[in-house]
Image (cartoon, grey):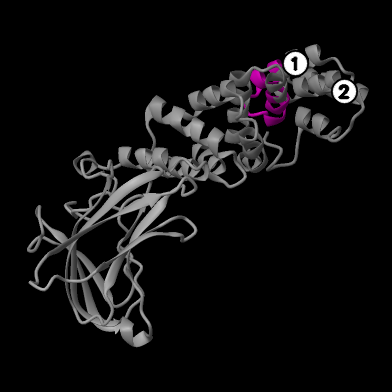
């Protein structure tokens, strides 16, 4: 009988009578009484094992706990002893097998067990064994992913687990996002971007230069950690325009309806290594903006690397500009974005259209 949901009877009642006791003699007597009524009673073997453990006889306790889980695979307390014992002996695979059994029966124990497991992932043997378990998608896979992603986890160890898992069976969207997040926390922006690119549709993957799809050739807006942001905010409409392009098939149209705007998009996270680069842009500004738009590249804390104003050429139509800039050593990642330095609210009340195309960053070898 499941004594969590009903009054214990027979052997269950005998075992329940000694719940919480630390007296090994009482535990043994209760266990033997239960076994006389039910010789295959797993809980009775657990009582015998607990009595042996209380006396310090860990070898006998381990033997009895193993009998207990064979008799009752849902006995999470027996699994807990065997899990601890396996981890103490360095047997990661056996320890994780018992952890899996525990979390399938009492999922709430994951709140304490999974962070404790995460804290030990500096051991590569444990990481490898964990990946073997996660590869078959146990019910707690999502919670383990969330634990790896949590700020308390070591990002290098968490990323190592997720990279091994990617090699083993591939990652779902949530796992790939967690991998990108952990790599970013480990200041490995280039690896994070590579992980993101691997999750992009193969047809769009060819657009992944240092700026992802700076020509705005994607069939539909691609989203994600290193894609263009399309969250333009009120007063602005972002769309791909197949009717007008500096080159290729289409460009980005940014429509303004006359309301005061705060520019949030387009913007994109970059993963440039330290060095010298050249920024190139094609644009056509047909707005009434009193101040010129600009394209800016900044570091994580907002340090400005370059701001290139977009001032139309006198002949009209597409204007192309380029300008060199440098990325310093302590700029772990960057953001490129459309910007406008407004002096007042009136400067932000814009109508018309701005088109962008051919946005690229290339390594400057001069």
Pinpoint residue 16: horizontal percent, then vertical percent: 81, 34
Label 2 or label 1, whichever comes before in sequence order: 2
Q: Residue at x 21, y 71 (%)?
A: 311
Name the image quarter holding the N terminus.
top right
Pinpoint residue 19: horizontal percent, then vertical percent: 83, 34
Label 1 residue SS: helix
Q: Which residue is mark 1?
A: 62
Magenta stretch bounds: 66-83
Q: Which residue is mark 2?
A: 54
Residue 251 versus residue 44: which sits nearer the camera?
251
Residue 143 versus residue 221: which sits nearer the camera?
221
Q: What is the spatial separation of the Cα atoms under label 2 and label 1, in whole angstroms? A: 12 Å
Q: Is 70 contained in the magenta span?
A: yes
Q: Is 213 contained in the magenta span?
A: no
Instruction: Work out whether 155 lies above or below 227.
Output: above
Residue 57 versus residue 26: which sits nearer the camera?
57
Left or right, residue 8 beside residue 116: right
């Amino acid at each position: 009988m499941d004594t969590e949901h009903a009054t214990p009877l027979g052997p269950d009642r005998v075992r329940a009578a000694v719940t919480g006791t630390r007296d090994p003699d009482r535990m043994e007597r209760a266990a033997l009484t239960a076994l006389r009524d039910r010789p295959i009673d797993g809980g009775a073997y657990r009582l015998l094992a607990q009595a042996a453990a209380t006396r310090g006889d860990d070898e006998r306790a381990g033997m009895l706990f193993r009998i207990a889980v064979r008799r009752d695979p849902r006995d999470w307390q027996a699994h807990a002893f065997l899990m601890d014992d396996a981890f103490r002996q360095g047997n990661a695979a056996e320890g994780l097998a018992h952890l899996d059994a525990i979390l399938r029966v009492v999922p709430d124990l994951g709140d304490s067990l999974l962070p404790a497991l995460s804290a030990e992932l500096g051991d590569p043997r444990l990481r490898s064994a964990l990946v073997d378990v996660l590869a078959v998608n146990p019910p707690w896979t999502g919670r383990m992913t969330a634990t790896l992603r949590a700020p308390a986890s070591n990002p290098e160890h968490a990323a190592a687990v997720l990279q091994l898992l990617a090699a083993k069976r591939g990652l779902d969207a949530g796992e790939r996002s967690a991998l990108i997040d952990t790599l970013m926390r480990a200041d490995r922006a280039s690896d994070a971007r590579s992980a993101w690119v691997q999750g992009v549709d193969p047809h769009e993957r060819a657009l992944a230069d240092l700026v992802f799809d700076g020509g705005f050739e994607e069939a539909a807006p691609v989203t994600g950690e290193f894609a263009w942001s399309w969250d333009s905010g009120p007063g602005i409409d972002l769309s791909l325009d197949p009717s007008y392009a500096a080159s290729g098939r289409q460009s980005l149209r940014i429509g303004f309806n006359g309301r005061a705007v705060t520019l949030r998009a387009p913007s994109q996270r970059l993963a440039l290594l330290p060095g010298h680069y050249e920024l190139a842009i094609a644009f056509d500004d047909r707005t009434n903006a009193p101040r010129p738009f600009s394209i800016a590249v900044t570091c994580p804390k907002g340090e400005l690397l370059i701001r290139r104003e977009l001032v139309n050429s006198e002949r009209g139509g597409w204007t192309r500009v380029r300008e060199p800039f440098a990325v310093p050593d302590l700029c772990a990642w960057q953001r490129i974005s459309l910007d406008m330095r407004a002096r007042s609210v009136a400067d932000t009340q814009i109508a018309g259209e701005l088109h962008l195309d051919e946005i690229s960053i290339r390594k400057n070898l001069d």
